[in-house]
Amino acid sequence: MPITRFGDIIRRHWRGIETHCDSQLTMMGLNIFSGKQWDVSSIPDLSGRVAIVTGGNTGLGYITVRELARKGARVYMLSRTQSRALTAIEKIKGEIGPDLQPEILYINFDLLSLKSAKKAAEELIQREERLDILVNNAGIMATPYELSPDGIEIQACNGTGHFALTVTLLPLLKETAAMPDSHVRIVNVTSGGYLAAHTTTPDFSSLEGLNQKTWSTWVRYGLSKLTNILLTNELQKRLAESGTTNIYCLSVHPGGVATELARGPVQSWPFLAPLWAIVSMLLMTPDQGALTQLYAATSPEVEEKDLKAALLFPVAQPKGKTSIAEDKDGKLGGDFWALCEALMRQKAG
């Protein structure tokens, strides 16, 4: 698709974004806020609750783990490298201070491996009798084309890896929702970059479709972030059909944030590396970027406003979905769900 056409699509779908997102230019991540906004001081007491955060050792995940633990939740940090996770846990404990005794634990989780994702969920189930908050935060952005050991394009693992984790955890999440005074949340971190999926024809009916080579790595990233939204839609629909109506599933776009995700674009375009220090000055900090997913995971307003299957933009603002993300007939979401189930049978055992 010509670049001019791509630009037209992005401009059309992002018209009015400044007003809707509290005057923040979210695609650029400009650090501009106005008026009163939700912040971590509004997080309620989370004592007795159990949470999972994937990719919790750095960036948005790190902040999310820290603030959930600060409010009393027992938090499981799911990430690939144990040494980095344990270092991050000790750092968080230092930041929280000696007056609190945060409970933060580590479980190995590799987003690129369906077997690893399933195993991580099974380990959590063995260790806990409840799960109140699941934040699917880990992600890969704008990397060169590459297949995972499971044969899945690695950016597509943003969707498939979290599917494997979430679906395996669903029985425990449902059990928790049946307990008194439960407030169960599933938060899928997506991106406004899902709009790039509009420049191609999404096909999640087969592995070949999922792995399609597009004209830009950003389009593959957009497709993966679309699957995060579709997973949210399908989860909410299927939970309701099963009779569970008090689990709230949300998709969250954090905005443009200075995190380690920049490694992907730098791999794709090494000449951009010297520019990153300048660009990062225009982006939000991880503390700011994590606000919307913390809101989705904890705020009573989610239930008060009935934000089921909602898409939130910074800070904590509902945003209308485009037609392919709304997926009213359920075709894209159904295809993605069925494909992930088939891949799990083949790869996760």
Image (cartoon, helix red, strand yellow):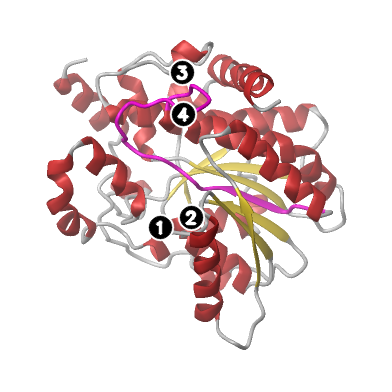
Mark 4 in CB contact with mark 1 (< 8 angstroms): no
What's the residue type where badge 4 is placed? Ser
Residue 151 part of the magenta-drawn span: yes
Q: Alpha-carbon distance for marks 2 and 4?
A: 30 Å
Give the magenta range: 130-153
What's the residue type where badge 1 is placed? Gly
User: Are there few (<14), some (14-19), or many (20+) residues within 10 Å of tag 3?
Assistant: many
Quadrant in which residue 315 is drawn:
bottom left
Q: Mark 4 — residue?
A: 148
Nearer to us of marks 2 and 3 is 3
User: Are there few (<14), some (14-19), or many (20+) residues within 10 Å of tag 2?
Assistant: many
Please give the name of the residue rendered at 51% of the width and 53% of the height, measured from the top-left corner. Answer: 81
SS category of the residue bearing label 1: helix
Q: Alpha-carbon distance for marks 1 and 3?
A: 28 Å
Q: Mark 1 — residue?
A: 289
Q: Mark 2 — residue?
A: 292
User: Are there few (<14), some (14-19), or many (20+) residues within 10 Å of tag 4?
Assistant: some
What's the residue type where badge 3 is placed? Leu
> In the rendering, which numbered label is found on residue 210?
3
Can you see residue 45? Answer: yes
Q: Alpha-carbon distance for marks 4 and 1?
A: 28 Å
